[in-house]
Image: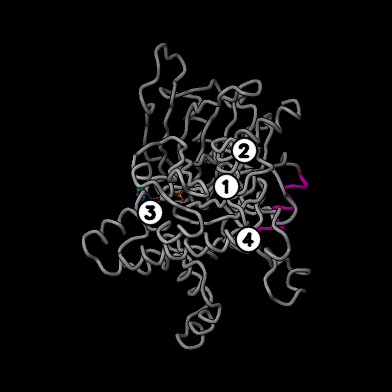
Amino acid sequence: MNVLVVNCGSSSVKYSLFRMPAGEGGAAEVRASGIVERIGLEPGRIRHRAVCAAGDSGPAEAGGRTDERDVAAPDHEAALALMINALSRGRLAVIAGPADIQAVGHRVVHGAEQFTGSVRVTGEVIRALKEFSALAPLHNPPNLVGIRAAQRLMPAAAHVAVFDTAFHQTLPPRAFLYALPYDLYAEHRIRRYGFHGTSHRYVTEAAAGVLGLPLGRTNLITCHLGNGCSAAAVEGGKSVDTSMGLTPLEGLVMGTRSGDLDPAVVFHLVRAQGMTPDEVDDLLNRRSGLLGVSGVASDMRDVMAAAAAGDRRAGLALDIFCYRLRKYIGAYTAVLGRVDGLVFTGGIGENSAEIRERTCCGLQPLGYVLDAALNAAPSRAPRDVAAPGSRSRILVIPTDEELLIARDTARLAAAAGA
Ligand code: ADP
């Protein structure tokens, strides 16, 4: 079965085409992937990579072949049509046409309380997503536009929605409720939802495998550290707490987001600094975090390079980043009691031995002891980097959200007889 995974943002569409194994146990294979960017701007741009082009007789070149060019992408439907063209026509085609795509998995940011797992897209699902758009005004509307355009362009395919929030729907009320007047939850559904659920779920399942434990008995603290960052406490394979809240702004320090702060800072900015709510929103979401503190960059590699070159504020940004994460690990250790594995994932978590080391430094009394050599050894494989005597294992697990979306999509499509 060919499964297309689509992630529609406000001005971009990312995609990956998978060939999924027929039965259990086979390996999924990425056939092509790419991105259409600058949707609505002139010109737009497509970058398409074919891993194994149709008609190839020999093995694909390492990393595949890539084509990049300017395009006219006035809206999401045009962007998806460009994607289908790239997949099915020309030098880097991997399928004969849209009819070769049996199922499409859509990444959807907010599934609110209704969606505790992935679902086939129906009229009812579309209506619910429209309703949740108020909870995720930046993300759900483009997700929805993408789903409808993809349904028009690939009417024969099964369409599946996979939610960033779904994995965290197992949080108990004490973890998801804010200490606000209860009516705000009961009437307006203001609560912690949590995000990055696809990644936390992927690494949870992978970590249970690495640890050789049944998923239902695996306790983990999973740290997804990318441009956005979040941590989750996972008990018996289920999320029981997570650092992001009503929106992805809460919790850890991120590339451009502040994470936790005293809500009164907002009133102060409005009253004393005369900022509008939109300006505060922009400040906290796009001008804070690593970028705001360092004044250098939102990208961790740039901040680390500046710190290494002696930039004081870049050093401070790193310090705050690791300190905040360490506090969450301590808190979630208290939540879980027994922690089988502390998991690092995302671009920073997977690649930066230094951030892992700085974060774990001081956590030895809680049972987290890194092995310096294992931690520093570069690898792309899921691995245990804890010292032999460490009470909890410390795992580095490359995440693969697209693969998880493809698996859910293939499963639901197969169940529906696609
Ligand atoms: P996204 O959240 O957009 O999916 P990624 O998970 O790819 O992003 O993470 C991007 C972040 O990972 C950037 O801050 C980048 O600097 C950081 N990163 C990637 N490689 C390294 C590395 N070797 N050392 C430190 N940070 C890294």
Viewer-proximal residue among 287 and 149:
287
Distance from the alpha carbon under mark 3 to that under mark 1: 19 Å
Q: Is residue 350 above or below residue 172?
A: above
- Tell me the amino acid under the disc marked 1: Asp
Looking at the image, which residue is at 52% across and 53% down?
10
Helix, strand or loop status at disc 2: loop
Q: Which residues are magenta?
A: 123-134
If you read the primary sequence from the N terminus, does the residue marked by circle 1 or circle 4 appear first? 4
Disc sitting over residue 335 in the figure: 4
Specify whether tag 1 is near ligand 1 (CB below 8 Å). Answer: no
Predominant secondary structure, magenta span:
helix
Residue carrying label 3: 357
Looking at the image, which residue is at 38% across and 36% down?
379
Helix, strand or loop status at disc 4: helix
Q: Is residue 390 covered in magenta? A: no
- For disc 3, the neighbor class at 10 Å (few under 14, some 14 to 19, many from 20) is some
Q: Residue furthest bottom?
A: 272
- Tell me the amino acid under the disc marked 2: Leu
Whether tag 1 and tag 2 are in contact, CB under 8 A, the answer is: yes
Residue carrying label 1: 340
Q: Residue furthest left?
A: 309
Q: Position of residue 12 (x, y in %)?
A: 48, 47
Distance from the alpha carbon under mark 4 to that under mark 3: 23 Å
If you read the primary sequence from the N terminus, does the residue marked by circle 2 or circle 3 appear first? 2
- Tell me the amino acid under the disc marked 3: Glu
Q: Position of residue 263 (x, y in %)?
A: 56, 77
Looking at the image, which residue is at 76% across and 74% down?
182
Q: Quadrant of the N terminus?
A: top right
Residue carrying label 2: 213
